[in-house]
Amino acid sequence: MNLGVIRRFGVVVRHRELGYSANAMVVWDVPDDYVSDVGRQLASQSAVTLCYRRPRRLPDWRYNLFSMVHGRDRDAVLAEIARLRADPLLTGIPCQPLFSKRRFKQRGARYSGLEKAA
């Protein structure tokens, strides 16, 4: 990393091969002054594998916080979402689970134009 050859080291988990066949991107409509607190809370949960903020696209898209939840089946994912929503910080915050219908190839980050280390 000091030489700039490696920027980051990570892993791509193929969740279906591990028995997790259902996943949903849960989108949340969080008041903007509250979104950092809610995001930290969601990101700290073991059921949440990704959590990030994105700008709203009003009037068509009101959601500003996105979190990914995986489960062995759809009912397991819905149960995790219900558990998350029971948290006092999340109670009453509108959300919508968006279940995946297709699987795309997963791969890590790729960088181009890097100079070779001497």
Image: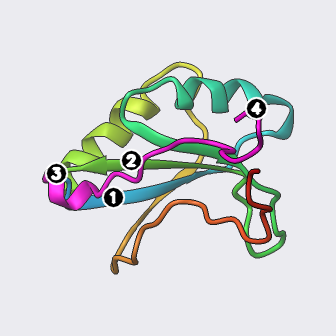
Amino acid at the residue labelled 3: Leu
Element under label 1? strand
Number of residue marks: 4
Neighbours of disc 4 within 10 Å: few (<14), some (14-19), many (20+): few
Q: Residue at x 32, y 49 (%)?
A: 70
Callout 4 secondary element: loop
Q: Which residue is mark 1?
A: 23
Q: Nearer the viewer, residue 80 or 82?
A: 80
Q: Which residue is mark 3?
A: 18
> Disc 2 on helix, strand or loop?
strand
Q: CA distance from mark 3 to mark 2?
A: 14 Å
Q: Which mark is residue 2?
A: 4
Which residue is more in the foreground, 16 or 71?
A: 16
Give the residues in magenta: 1-19
Circle 2 is placed at which residue position?
A: 69
Cα separation, mark 2 vs mark 4, equals: 35 Å
